[in-house]
Image (cartoon, helix red, strand yellow):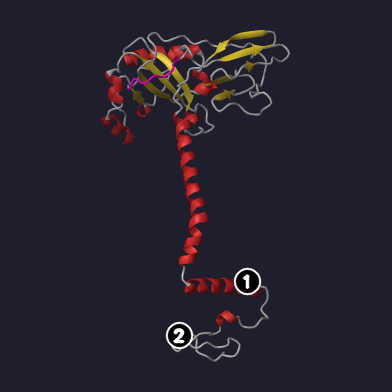
Amino acid sequence: PTAPVTFHAHLWDHPDLPRWLRFIQRGPTQPGFLYGCPLDSELGTHNLQVRSPPGGFGVTPERGRPTPGGDAPFQAEFVVGDRNVEELLPEGSREMFLRGSVGIWDRGDLHVINVTSALDRGGRVPLPIEGRKEGVHVLVGSHSPFSPCLLSAVSPQSRSRCQRGQRPLASCYDTLAPHFSIRWCDLTLDNQGSPHPVLGQPGFPSLTFVTPGQTGAPFSSPCDHRDKKGSHALSWDNLLIMIIGFFSFFLLFCREKRDLQTSDLQLFHHSSIAGDTRELRAMAGSRDVPRPLSTLPMFNVRTGQRHDPMGSARAPLL
């Protein structure tokens, strides 16, 4: 925006956004980016309406381009350590990254599939020091096999060097420098050939801009349709529900059976301990009290004879 503008993104009559949609704006003078990847059940369920303040501002929706040949079976995810997510969301920044990736992959049919902030992948917030960035995960796809440089970067020998704090085995280590700083130890490759939606693929999720008196072009962001984080979270939720259900079943149906099988002597000791505890708590508020009954002898273990606690102060203790 030409003038300082602070955008507030939320659902209609709700204070938040859908779980798949994110909004980021670093400051009033910085542009705001709304991006995300909906699930199949959420396709076409939302429209994006932008309310313009006095003076107006520009809205730039981006339309993705279909990938020739369909989904890219060979995918590599790079971690760019010297960028924030909003710096790689514009199309110009992605094109610059792809031009540098051509020298790594040795192929020209590269396409950006997903751009994700490292914070959304469990990364830490960087220290407020000049030049520190959050980091960005960039997923690049191709129909051509991986280059020898990429394969050597993920080899066991290279991973072992990364664990020792050494430089990984990658001949194309400095190909993207100085524009992008790649964390080669975090590089991941996927060549399973499973279908993944790419930017602009037919049927890819899109949002529609609805401005006062004008409807813009569909807006879509590069995103990986595999919601791995959501699936892991769902698995943990199911495990937690199973644990709670197991303990509830135990308390409802197994506790009574356990009480029936408990010996009378054990129950007697339990009740006596509970009674002594209540007695000591009642006596804790004052020193001017008689000797507690729990400290007086009541039972002779050798003869089995019982004594009155109040009248057998001289009887030997157990």
Disc nearest the viewer among 1 and 2: 2
Q: Where is 305 relative to 83, above or below?
A: below
The amino acid type, in three-letter code, at marker 2 is Val
Is residue 210 visible to the viewer in this orientation of the structure?
yes
Position in image of residue 4 (x %, y %): 67, 18
Q: Where is 261 relative to 166, above or below?
A: below
Labels 1 and 2: the sequence-earlier one:
1
Mark 2 is surrounded, within 10 Å at the Cα level, by few (under 14), some (14 to 19) or many (20 or more) other residues, namely few
Q: Secondary structure at mark 2?
A: loop
Tell whether position 194 is magenta.
yes
Q: Which mark is residue 301?
A: 2
Position in image of residue 11 (x %, y %): 64, 24
Residue at (41% x, 20% y) in the render: 139
- 156 or 71, nearer to the observer: 71
Is residue 37 visible to the viewer in this orientation of the structure?
no
Q: How many marks?
A: 2
Position in image of residue 255 (x %, y %): 50, 59
Quarter holding residue 159? top left
Q: Secondary structure at mark 1?
A: helix
Quadrant that contains the N terminus: top right
Q: Which residue is mark 1?
A: 281
- 264 or 199, nearer to the observer: 264
Query: With 278 as the anchor, is 99 left or right in this view?
Result: left
Quarter holding residue 48? top right
Query: With 129 as the anchor, is 105 left or right in this view?
Result: left
Q: Which mark is residue 188?
A: none
Residue at (64% x, 12% y) in the render: 210
Residue at (49% x, 34% y) in the render: 124
Which residues are the magenta region?
A: 192-198
* Residues at marks 1 and 2 touching, judged by CB atoms closer than 8 Å: no
The amino acid type, in three-letter code, at marker 1 is Arg
Q: Where is 75 relative to 293, above or below?
A: above
